[in-house]
Image: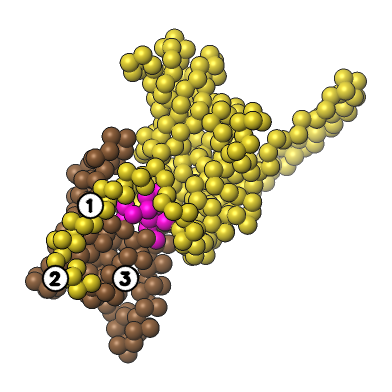
Chain colours: A yellow, B brown
Amino acid sequence: MEFVKRHPIVALLALGLIAVQVFPLSFGGRLGDGQVARSILTLSYFPQKLVFGINGSLARGWGNYINLAGIKSENERLREEIKELREEKFRLWEAELQNQRLKKLLDYKNASPIYSVITANVIGASPSALRSEVVIIDRGTRDGISEGMPVVTREGIVGRVYLAGGRSSEVVLITDPVSGVDAYIHRTRARGVIKGTGRGRVIMDYVENKSEVDVGDKVLSSGKDGFFPKGVVIGTVMGVEANGSVVKARVSPDLDLESLEEVIVVLKSPEDAVISE
Amino acid sequence: MNRALTFIFFAALSLTLLTIQSTILSPRNLGFLSPDLNLLLVIFFSLYSGIKWGGAMALGNSYMMDALSGHITGAHLLSRMSAFILIQSLSGQFFRMRGIQAAAIVFGTLFSWIFFWAIASMRTDFDFPMSAADIALQAVVNAVVGVPLFFLIEWTNAKLQR
């Protein structure tokens, strides 16, 4: 320490030299097994959850106050809606019975979901402007979550678990520059790779034929990358440009990743994914 | 001065600032208008603590930043320790003077980001997320938030020590 105090320039040069060696490795992946990082994630869980709770209470309180004004007319409208829904329920019940009879006839087996899922709240985000495409969820290894598991919502793909602590986990969003998802164009089945470019944007790269992708096409996950299940919506093509012999498409995620509140973690290990799909 | 109390105070402060920066003042929500409270704490340590004690606290805080921001173990740690050493070496000459804290904060913020930029520019697959204007904006935001924050930290620590 005395050396650092006496020779700060030498110390700075040494740190710079270490950084040159370390950064190329660590932008793409964490150094070491991350056990200390996991402990820090767990340590920060409690205050983050507290802030999340307070924020939620304040938002609910404000929402209740705003809603109070129109509650009477809303009540009457809902009563009418319930009446209509009861009638519809009866019709659906009739249809369900008929459906069951027909299924029995066809020896149809109910399709069971392939993977278990667990819901989680987004309680925090990366504190760094250098890498802001990371969110923190309130579920961890205690809930069966492990690193690499895909995270989605009903509207589409969110990202994947990068670090799983005991009670919370870090999720790298698909918009992060290190993220990659094997995907295809729904209309033409043309394959490509969805890559994050930061600041909420993604591109679909390595599409082989320009005629196979057009503005407005839906992009879905192919399941071939070993992380994400097949057929989950990613977004819509907003623009196409030729990039040498391949095509690069600008894709707008269907899901609003800027205002994530709740997500679904698919409890699927990356290892068995490719085999099963 | 009660060293144990000081350690507990700064460890708790470090965790509190990290929580605030990863929830309500996250750069994800506020972009570059979000003050970097943890960098401010490192600058505070470099101005008002010894190299051993302040260095250890700054190291711990920077590692926590790395751990919570995904992937880049070493990025914050190295850039912030470099800023810490530089400001610490300059603090004896002029940064300790009253009214010049803002200059130390601006200098520390600029140095920290230029350090990132210099290293990131060696890679072709990493887009540096900030422009020169963004960095300048964050330096100003940090200075505006940092000066009262330093006063608050000093005041609270002094109260605790009594």
Kindly report the distance in space between the C-alpha atoms of the residues bearing marks 3 and 2. Answer: 18 Å
- Say if labels 1 and 2 share a chain: yes
Range of magenta residues = B64-76
**Chain holding disc 3:** B
Return the x and y of residue B144 as percentages of the image width and height. Answer: 22, 61
The residue labelled by disc 1 is: A17
Which residue shows up at 41% across the image and 72% down it? B12
Secondary structure category for the residue under label 3: helix
Above or below for B63 versus A104: below
Determine which of the numbered discs, if any, sits on residue A6 in the image.
2
Residue B17, by quadrant, is bottom left
Which residue shows up at 38% across the image and 21% down it? A248
**Chain holding disc 1:** A
Q: Amino acid at mark 2?
A: Arg
Kindly report the distance in space between the C-alpha atoms of the residues bearing marks 3 and 1. Answer: 21 Å
Q: Upstream in the sequence, badge 1 or badge 2? A: 2
Return the x and y of residue A195 as percentages of the image width and height. Answer: 42, 31
Which residue shows up at 37% across the image and 53% down it? B73
Q: Amino acid at mark 1?
A: Leu
Kindly report the distance in space between the C-alpha atoms of the residues bearing marks 1 and 2. Answer: 19 Å
Horizontal side, residue B70 vs residue B102: left or right: right
The residue labelled by disc 3 is: B56
Decide whether residue B67 is among the magenta residues. Answer: yes
Q: Are marks 3 and 1 in contact (CB under 8 Å)?
A: no
**Chain holding disc 2:** A
Horizontal side, residue B108 vs residue A84: left or right: left
Judging depth in this view, the residue of A133 and A149 nearest the camera is A149
Above or below for B140 versus A94: below
